[in-house]
Image (cartoon, rainbow, N blue to C red):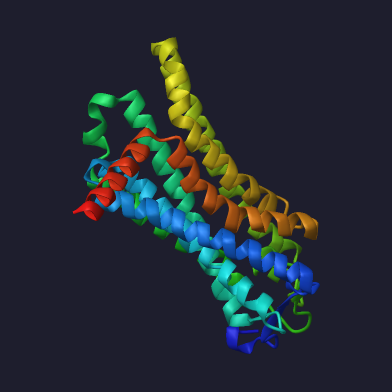
């Protein structure tokens, strides 16, 4: 097969969406509520950071971008799932499937770089507080965002370019809610073992490498604080706990999906809900509940709203 248009498979059947009417109603309700929470929660943080001048700092600039990325990540799959659950035919076109995969991996790559940037930001703020604003200037912050998108595109295209040229000539059924490289490779009319290894080497090692880099970074910060003043360790841990929680929540499903490329369907479906619906909801919740600046900004916003009503 020479390319996308030469494929004999024109659509992919998503078997996970073919279920009883009661289960469909449950999935529609859960997905709709979670997606609404993703949109409202993350856009609220984005709005708060943009319009509250007290939050115009590198950390909140990165946090706002993380919220935007979470909205994009959830939007690649959840609306399509809700739409398909309401329709009789649970299919996605082959072109749509490839597009969905690319967007998932691009956005995933951006989020990994953003989490690294946020770790670097906290490392600079805690270990070199006097030089923080000089190091974390606007150019560095924008460079992180650009690097994230470039990394995401390279990460997605490096897998897409060889998968798109595989011969898809027969089976077109996937027991999942969405398309992804490990699932689509299994449909190719060729020996998929070496291609599965490439996906594992790319996505799996990238996920594991980034995860361990982040854990080492936060461990280094805590050790540095402990050496300087043991009394400040608890404060540093409280500050970093939100970041560490987000790292574990984001990378645990990724490592299961790509380091273990053939998980049982039940685990794969549960990981999907965690990765694309629950984590994008938890991110704004975690940063809102554990961050004093955000809480103060919310109070300022509520006071402004109350004042405008009386005026």
Front position in the image: 195 or 53: 53
> Residue visible at 45% across and 53% down?
41
171 vs 51, left or right, is right
Q: Quadrant of residue 3?
A: bottom right
> Residue visible at 71% across and 70% down?
25
The x and y percentages for residue 65 are 38, 53
> Residue visible at 37% across and 38% down?
295
> Residue visible at 50% across and 26% down?
219
The quarter of the image holding the N terminus is bottom right
The quarter of the image holding the C terminus is bottom left
The x and y percentages for residue 241 are 50, 31
Residue 155 can be seen in this image:
no
Front position in the image: 202 or 183: 183
The x and y percentages for residue 84 are 65, 77
Front position in the image: 206 or 139: 139
- Farthest-out residue, front: 310
Using the image, determine if residue 115 lies above or below residue 308. above
30 vs 265, left or right, is left
The x and y percentages for residue 159 are 58, 65
Total numbered labels? 0
65 vs 218, left or right, is left
Using the image, determine if residue 2 lies above or below residue 76. below
Residue 74 can be seen in this image:
yes
Front position in the image: 295 or 220: 295
């Amino acid at each position: 097969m020479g390319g996308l248009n030469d494929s004999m498979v024109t659509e992919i059947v998503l078997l996970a969406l073919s279920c009883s009417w009661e289960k469909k109603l449950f999935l529609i309700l859960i997905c709709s509520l979670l997606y609404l929470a993703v949109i409202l929660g993350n856009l609220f943080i984005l709005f708060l950071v943009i319009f509250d001048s007290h939050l115009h700092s590198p950390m909140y600039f990165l946090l706002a971008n993380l919220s935007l990325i979470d909205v994009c990540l959830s939007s690649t799959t959840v609306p399509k799932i809700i739409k398909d659950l309401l329709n009789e035919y649970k299919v996605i076109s082959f072109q749509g499937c490839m597009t969905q995969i690319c967007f998932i991996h691009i956005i995933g790559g951006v989020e990994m770089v953003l989490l690294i940037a946020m770790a670097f930001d906290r490392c600079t703020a805690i270990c070199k507080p006097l030089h923080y604003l000089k190091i974390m200037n606007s150019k560095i912050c924008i460079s992180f965002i650009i690097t994230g998108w470039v990394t995401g595109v390279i990460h997605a295209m490096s897998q897409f370019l060889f998968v798109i040229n595989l011969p898809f000539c027969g089976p077109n059924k996937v027991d999942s809610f969405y398309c992804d490289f490990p699932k689509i490779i299994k449909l190719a009319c060729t020996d998929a073992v070496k291609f599965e290894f490439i996906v594992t080497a790319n996505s799996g090692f990238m996920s594991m490498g980034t995860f361990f880099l982040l854990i080492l970074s936060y461990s280094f910060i805590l050790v540095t604080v402990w050496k300087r003043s043991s009394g400040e360790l608890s404060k540093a841990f409280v500050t970093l706990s939100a970041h560490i929680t987000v790292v574990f929540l984001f990378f645990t499903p990724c490592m299961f999906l790509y380091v273990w490329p053939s998980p049982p369907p039940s685990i794969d479906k549960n990981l999907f809900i965690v990765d694309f619906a629950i984590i994008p909801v938890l991110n704004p919740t975690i940063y809102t509940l554990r961050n004093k600046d955000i809480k103060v900004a919310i109070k300022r916003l509520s006071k402004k709203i109350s004042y405008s009503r009386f005026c």
